[in-house]
Amino acid sequence: MPWWSWVILGLVLAAIELATPGGFFIIFFGIAALVVGGLVLSRVVAAAWIQWLLFPIIAVVALRLFRQPLLGWMRTREGADEIDSLVGEVALASGEIPPGQHGRAELRGSSWAARNVDTRPLTAGQRCRVVAVQGLMLDLRQE
C-alpha cells in the first residue's frame, strides 16, 4: 500500500475519534496508520504483509501504553477546574452555624454541607464567602 494511503487512513481515523464521544480507542489506530505511513515513506518497510502486520501491533501497543494515562489526565483536569471554581463564590447559610460547627449552605442552587471557619456565627440567610472546599464540604466565612 502506498504511504499516502496510510496517512489518509490515519487522518480519517483521527477525525472519527474527534467526531465521536468515546474513550480514546480509534485514535491509536489512526496513530498506527500514520506511523506505518511514515515507515513506508522512509523505505524502512516495503512489503505489504509487513505493513498490515505492523498496523495492528503498533495500535494495540499504543493503546495499552497510553490510553489509561491519557484518561487519567483528562479526568484530573476536569475535576480540578470544577471544584476549584467554587472558592471565592458567595453562598447563603441555610440555618444558624456557630463558629467551628457544621451546617448547610445554598450555593449555585444546591444544598451543600458547610463548616463555619469564622470566629463569628453565621445566621440563616446570611451571605458568606467560600474560602476552601474539602471534598463535599464548603468552608465559609462571613462576607
Image (cartoon, helix red, strand yellow):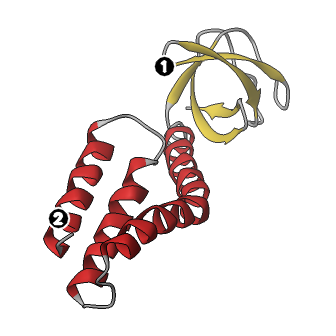
Q: Residue 47, image x and y in percent?
A: 31, 79
User: On screen, 119 above or below 58?
Assistant: above
Which quadrant holds the N terminus? bottom left
Observer-nearest of 15 and 46: 46
Name the residue at 24% across, 90% down.
42
Name the residue at 54% across, 44% down.
84
Question: In the image, what residue type sits under mark 2?
Answer: Ser
Observer-nearest of 52 and 56: 52
User: On screen, 91 above or below 1?
Assistant: above
122 to the left or right of 131: right
Name the residue at 57% across, 39% down.
83
User: On screen, 78 above or below 29?
Assistant: above
Q: Residue 71, image x and y in percent?
A: 55, 50
* Between discs 2 and 1, the one toward the N terminus: 2
> What crowding class fits label 2: few (fewer than 14 Cα within 10 Å), some (14-19), or many (20 or more)?
few
For discs 2 and 1, the disc positioned in front in the rendered view: 2
Q: Residue 90, image x and y in percent?
A: 50, 28
Question: In the image, what residue type sits under mark 1?
Answer: Arg
Q: Residue 100, image x and y in percent?
A: 85, 32
Q: Residue lying farthest bottom? A: 43
The residue identified by callout 2 is 5
Name the residue at 53% across, 60% down.
60
Residues at discs 2 and 1 in contact (Cβ within 8 Å): no
Q: Is mark 2 on a helix, strand or loop?
A: helix
Observer-nearest of 35 and 20: 35
Which quadrant holds the C terminus? top right
The residue identified by callout 1 is 108
- Quarter location, residue 96: top right
> What crowding class fits label 1: few (fewer than 14 Cα within 10 Å), some (14-19), or many (20 or more)?
few
Cα distance in 3D space between marks 2 and 1: 52 Å
